[in-house]
Image (cartoon, helix red, strand yellow):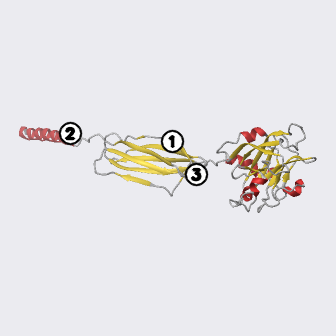
Amino acid sequence: MEKINQVRSLLFVIGVSFFLFSSCGDKEEPIPAGPTMSITTATFTGIPGEVASTTISGTTLGGFNVLRISKTVDGAVDDSFSEEHLRDVAGQQEYSVDFTYTLIEAEVGKEVVFTFLAVDDNSLQSTDVFTVTTDATPIPVTSWTAKLLYAPTGDLTSNTFFSTNTGTIYNVSGVNSTADPVSAEIDFGYFYGVTANASLVDIATYDTFTGLTQVASWGTKNATKFKLTTIVAADFDAIGATDGDILGVHLDNSTNVPVDASVTGLNEGDIISFATDASKTDGSKIGLIKISKLFLGADGTGFASDAYIEIEVKL
């Protein structure tokens, strides 16, 4: 009986020892910390055609597996976009990915967000985002300032006529004396009449309107259209070199559509809309004219050779 108890005790000790040994051997190693992530640039603002870029990098003690990139536009998932960058070798602990994106017209004014998701071999993750804002492409504005147009004179030497394409001022004598077809460039002229007072007149009707013989021999007589607007001078002055969109807003207003071959009774500060002849080589252009100054000459009649109108043009 005593021997049986001794055997039982020995078996118990062996069993306990085996259990303790087995328990120590099955202890799991701790899982390494998940991936880290940093990006060189978190935001980008540009215009269509420009390229946004950033670099995503970090460490993965548990072994880098993949970097996934997804995209949303104004919060909605863009399923047409997906990008993955897999590890180079098993056990890789560092990663670095250069990301680029070309801005497009369709995303002007929308919030585009790219989400970067790094995953390690233990399925642990890290994320960051890159926000891209696309602004509308600035529309350039052509400006001509301090252009003086003088009242027409009988000797045809007054600088009376203007080209919105080039900003050049012409006189009839100069146009008539050249073999170049410069008349095709000229859009309108200045005239001061007894009842019409200060006026801008297109070339097609200039001689009829004024009762003069100024442009009769010109090979091309452009039909420009005008409209006296209610736009104030301050708004005209505020239109900058890349504010073609703002200029367009003024010109899209139905009350500012140019329809007349002449505009009369002009005063300083007036803003006139105009549209050049559609048959010009570069097609019709629209824009605004500001009357900066009106000088009636030393005699105050407006007819003398020293009388002029000063204009600024934006188109």
Q: Amino acid at mark 3?
A: Glu
Of the residues tagged 2 and 1, which is closer to the observer?
A: 1
- Where does the N terminus fall, quadrant-wise? top left
Q: Secondary structure at mark 2?
A: helix
Give the numbered dot on residue 107. 3
What residue sits 41% from the left and 47% below the top? 98
**Which residue is pictured at 85% across the width and 41% down the height?**
267
What residue does disc 1 label? 43
Q: Is residue 47 visible?
A: yes
For disc 1, the neighbor class at 10 Å (few under 14, some 14 to 19, many from 20) is some
Q: CA distance from mark 2 to mark 1?
A: 51 Å
Of residue 220 and residue 26, the one placed in the foreground of this image is: 220
Measured along the vertical axis of the image, is residue 33 above or below residue 114?
A: above
Whether the residues at callouts 2 and 1 have beta carbons within 8 Å, the answer is no
Q: Is residue 132 left or right of residue 26?
A: right
Q: CA distance from mark 3 to mark 1?
A: 15 Å
- Contact? badges 3 and 1 (CB < 8 Å): no
Q: Could you tell me the amino acid type at mark 2?
A: Cys
Q: Which of marks 2 and 3 precedes in the sequence?
A: 2
Q: Residue at x 10, y 39 (%)?
A: 10
Find residue 260 and name its label: none
* Image x and y of residue 24, in percent: 20, 39
Instruction: Where is residue 59? Give x, y as percent.
Output: 34, 41
Q: Residues within 10 Å of mark 2 (few under 14, many from 20)?
A: few
